[in-house]
Amino acid sequence: MNNLTDKFDKYINDCLKNPLSQFHHLSGSGATYEFEQKLKKYYSKKHAVTFSNCTSAMLTLCHSLNLKNKEVITTPLNWGGSISPIIFSGSKIIFSSIDQKSLNLNPSDLVNSLSSKTKAVLSVDYNGIPSDSKQIKEFCKSNNLYYISDSAQSFGAFRDQRPAGYFADFIVLSFGPGKSLFGGEGGAILTDNEEIYEKLIWFSQHPFRQKSIFGPDTYNEYLPFNGRLNPFSAIMLNNLFNVFLKRIKTKQIKTFDLLNLLSKNKFVHLPDQISQFNNSAYFKLQYLLSKNIKIKIINDFLKINNFKFQATQYKPNLIPLNKSFIRQFKNKYHSNKSYLKNLLHLDYISLNEITNDNILID
């Protein structure tokens, strides 16, 4: 931690002593460059672009993909910051079905949401459980669609021996509060698509960075999004990258042991894919409750076995049934209301840690 503080002090002092150094981060150099290199290596992707936050990243991506007067298929279990950029870009949201155990988009049902206007699919790694990006990508490839993976909650998780979201055309990350990678604030997009990568730079990054990529005479000072990552977030994320990886692994091992016990005692139904500790980032622990199992039984079990967790009842927050969403966007989405209401009859639990020992750095 002292090393990180020293890095902050050095950056501030350098900026005060030499005003020219205040502009270095505008070109995407220094800590920003180093952090993007680490992301590219971790995900085995050609390009990484960091942003001020995940919503800015999504807005820039939607603009770069020209999502206007189109349809985007996604999950009803979502975050407003993921779908609002799609709506404000002029496209319609089509809510498809989810897998009842993982609460992620159901790949086998995507075809029922397909139309001539469909332009993209947006999956969400809900609660840190990776969506089946391999199968979703196959569907998108066969139907000439873009595939976006909102992997904001799943950094550190693996599926099919690859990082969460790996097979998507675009992996979107968040570094805000509660995320596996915490930088105070921030986001990123990972891709192999050269054309869209250049548009991401063109529409969101400072002209200094554009010049370093496109040449000194080619830049856009009329960019619609001032999306670059804050230099202090870049310093923090770059210097603590390996610390975060170590921390998420410790959390995964501990949580996996707990969930295995609950599953073996037939208290909950775990997603089929969770067979190894790193198959989820365990952003939130919300699982399908077994039939006729009471919350009190689980809490008694947790207490007897010295697990410092408490189980509470959980009902999925389905965006198409949210009154605020309906009021604002009633003509900009489509969903199967009867299907959604049936989901509300299922019983889920949420496991919440009741200790105060999850300190980031000793």
Image (cartoon, helix red, strand yellow):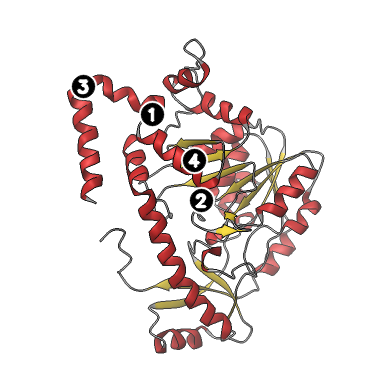
Q: Is residue 115 left or right of residue 131?
A: right
Labels 2 & 3 near each other (Cβ < 8 A):
no
How far apart marks 1 and 3 lie (CA) works out to: 17 Å
- CA neighbours of label 1 inside 10 A, class few (<14), some (14 to 19), many (20+): some
Q: Of residues 140 and 278, which is closer to you in this image? A: 278
Number of numbered markers: 4
What mark, if any, has residue 152 been given in the picture? 2
For label 4, the residue is 188
* Amino acid beneath label 2: Ala
Mark in the foreground, 4 or 1: 1
Mark in the foreground, 1 or 2: 1
* Amino acid beneath label 3: Asn
Secondary structure found at label 2: loop
Mark in the foreground, 2 or 3: 3
How far apart marks 4 and 3 lie (CA) works out to: 29 Å
How far apart marks 4 and 1 lie (CA) works out to: 16 Å
For label 1, the residue is 29
For label 3, the residue is 18
- CA neighbours of label 2 inside 10 A, class few (<14), some (14 to 19), many (20+): many
Q: Residue at x 42, y 20 (%)?
A: 208
Secondary structure found at label 3: loop
Q: Residue at x 51, y 50 (%)?
A: 152
